[in-house]
Image: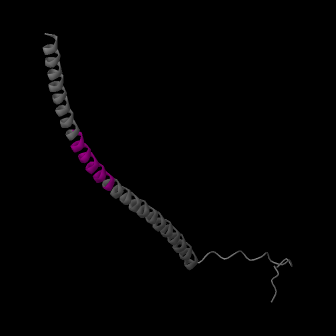
Amino acid sequence: MTDRSPNGFASPEPAAPAPSDIELATKRLAAALDALETAVERRREADRAEDELGARIQALGADRSRLANELDGTLTRSRALERTNREIAERLDVAIDTIRSVLEGESS
């Protein structure tokens, strides 16, 4: 048995066999797995970004609480300084009035 055609020449190379259903299904499965891996990686990145955002929000909340406490302390101190300032101004007014009355008494 020879691979010769009726004209005596060797027959051309046989055509590549068409891919079987199993090969096509395997390729589709591999493509689906690649897409799934890509989706999983994107989800992991999104989860990491969400975790980082949560940590930042928590840090901002802690900073806000600390700043609110500092502000309360500063307001308390400011009010105390204002009270002290008013008391000193009143004492200065009394001292000025006393000095004026002494000076007026001497000039009379």
In-front residue for pair 22/76: 76
Is 77 or 40 nearer to us in this picture?
A: 77
Asked whether, in this view, residue 71 is left or right of residue 106, the answer is right
Report which quarter residue 93 is drawn in: top left
Which residue is nearer to you in this view: 71 or 78? Answer: 78
Where is 5 relative to 77, above or below?
below
Indicate left or right for 9 with 80 as reference. Answer: right
The picture quadrant where one finds residue 105 is top left
Residue at 48% over, 66% down:
41
Q: Residue 4: x and y, percent?
A: 82, 81
Looking at the image, which residue sits at the far right? 8
Magenta segment, prevailing SS (helix, strand or loop): helix
Q: Using the image, determine if residue 23 lies above or below residue 53.
A: below
Quadrant location of the C terminus?
top left
The quarter in which the N terminus is drawn is bottom right
Q: How many marks?
A: 0
Height in image: 80 above or below 19? above
| Magenta segment | 62-78
**95, 88: nearer the viewer:** 95
Spot occupied by residue 14 in the image (x, y as percentages of width and height): 74, 77
- As drawn, 88 above or below 33: above
Q: Where residue 42 appears, x then y in whole percent?
A: 47, 63
Residue visible at 15% across and 21% down?
97
